[in-house]
Amino acid sequence: MKTIFEKSKAGKTTQYLPEITKAKNPGRYLPAHLLNQAGADLPEVSELDVVRHYTNLSQKNFSVDTHFYPLGSCTMKYNPKINEALCQLPEFTQAHPYLNQGQVQGCLQIMEELDRYLAEISGMDGFTLLPAAGAHGELTALLMMAAYFKAKGEKREVILVPDSSHGTNPASASMAGFTIKQIKSDSEGNVDLAELEKHLNDNVAGLMLTNPNTLGLFEKQIVKLAGMLHAKGALLYYDGANLNALMGKARPGDMGFDLIHINLHKTFATPHGGGGAGSGPVGAKGELVKYLPYPRVAKAGETYHFFNPEKTIGKIKAFYGNFLVLVRAHVYIRALGGEGLKEASEIAVLSANYLKEKLKAYYDLPYPRTCMHEFVLSAGNLKKLGVKALDVAKSLLDHGIHPPTIYFPLIVPEALMIEPTETENLETLDEFAQIMIEIAQKAQTNPEEITHAPQNTWVKRIDEVRAARELCLKG
Ligand SMILES: *Cc1c(COP(=O)(O)O)cnc(C)c1O
């Protein structure tokens, strides 16, 4: 497909409005030396060309709205359209961040309520809604940790991460100036407490943990683990990108976590995956609440107002975060209610276990335990046939299914990490299972078909190394 620049033809336009493109006296507003003499290098196409170009491009997209998308750890659930309808109300989209507080009381109310809802759901004492994504939330919380220990006069330089952790964890810790030490998992996929004991000392600031972890498994000894860290004066950080398994069932705050980020764009239903606006609020407990970034919102009588936490680390995002994502999360929480959120988590976990049971006879299941919202298979059993996890993923594309996350977590060779979410019906789950089974069977009878997939897509098998080294965006 041609780019819009390649479709350009000199002089081609659509003109049904009077020509006003050349202002009579542009120098009226700007001094001549600031005016662009050469003209803008824009494609010259008709309005209909523009509409067709972008409509066609949009239809080549793969999305939750078009296809099943079981991309592990990404929670690609259906995002209810009511979220979009409400967050597009002009009262929200046109609320200028410089308006004074009295003029945007409704917006402040949304923020104050969302802060409380998240605290209730997660068992934390207070939140900042500013961080723009999960990784940004991690960085925020780590900067809070650093400020907290500095205020206590303690020098702690190390952050511990399990070997199953999401790559953003060590990256954020490093960015916040910490040194990273990795903790091995035990044979059941949990943090190995003996290993943890070995690494725990007065130089450890904290441990970053996902629970359920990236294997989709619940840390069985979480309370003991939290006790071990606290006994050494260290903090426990919860990577809550994957809160989808726990809503209304268990709360990180009750498990002993001190700081948490929640990916609103995953669990609380904002379209994501294209790098668009996200939100990763950070929650804190006890003393740590005082270190949250500013501003937060409080209610006094009937009015809402901004305030700065006592020992705030400062500002980590312009204005008030990605406000429209906050509106979507607020709408989602209100629409589902407490019972609805609980049911969402129950179905998410049930769906993952249903698929795990259907597929375990055809793929390796390295940790055969009840899983939470996702599970990790291994295509290791197909490797001797010349078929890799990558081939299984490419083959799914031929069937109109987005592949699971592959080769992550790193501790599972040929990993296929599957997260169906609660919003897929039984029919879709069964269809997916059937296709996965057929792929495993075809690996025995006709492996070439799998290793040469995809055949039905716009782009066939690509050389991924070359794509990264010789970046070409022309398509
Ligand atoms: C998605 C995810 C993150 C990062 O979130 P972003 O919003 O993409 O920055 C961190 N940890 C886990 C476990 C995740 O699944």
Image (cartoon, helix red, strand yellow):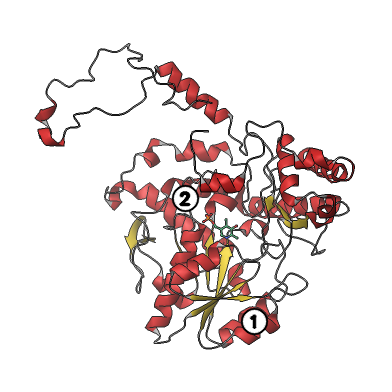
Where is residue 174 drawn, in percent x and y? 47, 70
Q: For residue 37, what is the image quadrant?
A: top left
Residue lying at 82% horizontally and 63% vertically, measured from the top left:
368
Could you tell me if the residues under marks 2 and 1 are in contact, i.e. CB atoms within 8 Å? no
Q: Nearer the viewer, residue 375 or 7?
A: 7
Q: Nearer the viewer, residue 342 or 273?
A: 273
Check disc 2: other Cα within 10 Å, few if <14, some if 14-19, many if 20+. Answer: many
Q: CA gap, disc 2 to disc 1?
A: 36 Å
Q: Nearer the viewer, residue 305 or 294?
A: 294
Please, what secondary structure does the residue beneath circle 2 have? helix
Q: Quadrant of ligand 1?
A: bottom right
Q: Which mark is residue 61?
A: none
Where is residue 91 drawn, in percent x and y? 37, 39
| Side of 154 where 218 appears, left or right | right
Q: Is residue 279 above or below residue 90?
A: below
| Side of 384 where 134 appears, left or right | left
Closer to viewer: mark 2 or mark 1: 1
Where is residue 138 drawn, in percent x and y? 49, 65
Amino acid type, mark 1: Leu
Which quarter of the figure is the N terminus placed in?
A: top right
Check disc 1: other Cα within 10 Å, few if <14, some if 14-19, many if 20+. Answer: many
Residue lying at 50% horizontally and 35% vertically, measured from the top left:
85
Amino acid type, mark 2: Leu
Please, what secondary structure does the residue beneath circle 1 have? helix
Q: Is residue 208 above or below residue 379?
A: below
Q: Which mark is residue 326?
A: 2
Residue lying at 45% horizontally and 75% vertically, measured from the top left:
145
Q: How many marks?
A: 2
Q: Which mark is residue 196?
A: 1
